[in-house]
Amino acid sequence: MNITVNNEKINELLKDFYLLTKLRVALFDTQGNELSCYPTECSPLCSRIRSRVFGFKMCKETDTNAFLEVTNKMEPYIYSCHVGLTEGILPFVYKDNLVGFLMFGQVKVYGNTLQRSHVDDSDINEAQILQTLYDDMPIHSEEFIHSAMNILQVFGAYIRFSEYVYLFRGGVIALVEDYLRLNYFESVNIQMLSERFNIGRTQLSVKFKKMLGVSIIEYVNRLRIEKAKELLKDSDNTGAQIAEAVGFQDYNYFARVFKKVTGVTLSQIKASQERFSLPLQ
């Protein structure tokens, strides 16, 4: 079942959930693709684990198993991930169809301990870094987790009632979105897209904003910033190199867009990476 979401409205609601609970929350489609989330970044611990191939694979496997569990039972599900953190997920049903999942996660609960099955026993420094990140996480009760799940169900019902999610079976906007996902690093403008997909500029802009909740330029910039965040994990890449690689010709504009989308500056990202790349004393 293909769906599209009004990202602007969905993000506002997910942000509200976060402000109430301080828990990261995301909306996924039935294939496990993250459609919208708040905040954008995972916890420092999870980001560290997912930066390694084996850790990333285990996270994906845990998510997939949770999606299957909810698909089979069609009811909320609270569980511990492979790291030992607690997560909650519920089915998102629209017009009697399972169209996705709402998930909150990366929560340390009383009684949890950090699991290090993804870390080589000989990598003492990495184990220390992970333990420090785990120790820095706030701790919650099981009662808090169940309350958060109840709140998330209310948010899900409001999203359905407000029709911020659409069943979507194709059309020109789907083609434009697919094109942008594949060509975000190229020079893109509305006139070019209008001519390529044989649709008026105004009609294209209005339909795109209605279906996805953001303008075409905002959408392209978000795609570029997501790729930039991946490239930033390699400390050898300079900001100027990353800007050019993802399609920004002006580094200063890239830096401004990065701050607007992520809420942090490039220098803050680099400083954080340098902090956790140093051996603990």
Image: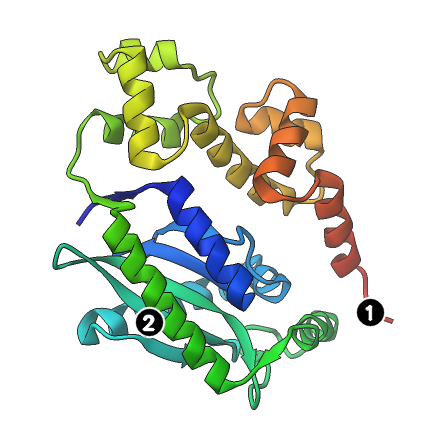
Quadrant in the rendering for residue 51: bottom right
Name the mark on residue 254: none
Question: Which mark is in front, 2 or 1?
Answer: 2
Check the image and report above or below for 172 versus 211: above
Q: Would you name the residue on which mark 1 appears?
A: 280
8 left or right, relative to 31? right
Check the image and report above or below for 43 versus 268: below
Q: Which residue does the image show at 26% across and 72% down from the upper left?
A: 70
**Percent coordinates x, y for residue 172 in the rendering:** 21, 24
**Percent coordinates x, y for residue 151 in the rendering:** 39, 69
Q: Which residue does the image show at 24% across and 75% down from the upper left?
A: 75
Q: Is residue 225 visible?
A: yes
Q: Which residue does the image show at 67% across and 44% down from the upper left?
A: 264
* Distance Cα–Cα, label 2 vs label 1: 35 Å
**Percent coordinates x, y for residue 229 in the rendering:** 58, 43
224 or 200: which is nearer to us?
200
Q: Would you name the residue on which mark 2 appears?
A: 66
Q: Which residue does the image show at 65% across and 19% down from the upper left?
A: 250
In the rendered image, the residue lying farthest to the bottom is 111
Q: Is residue 80 visible?
A: no
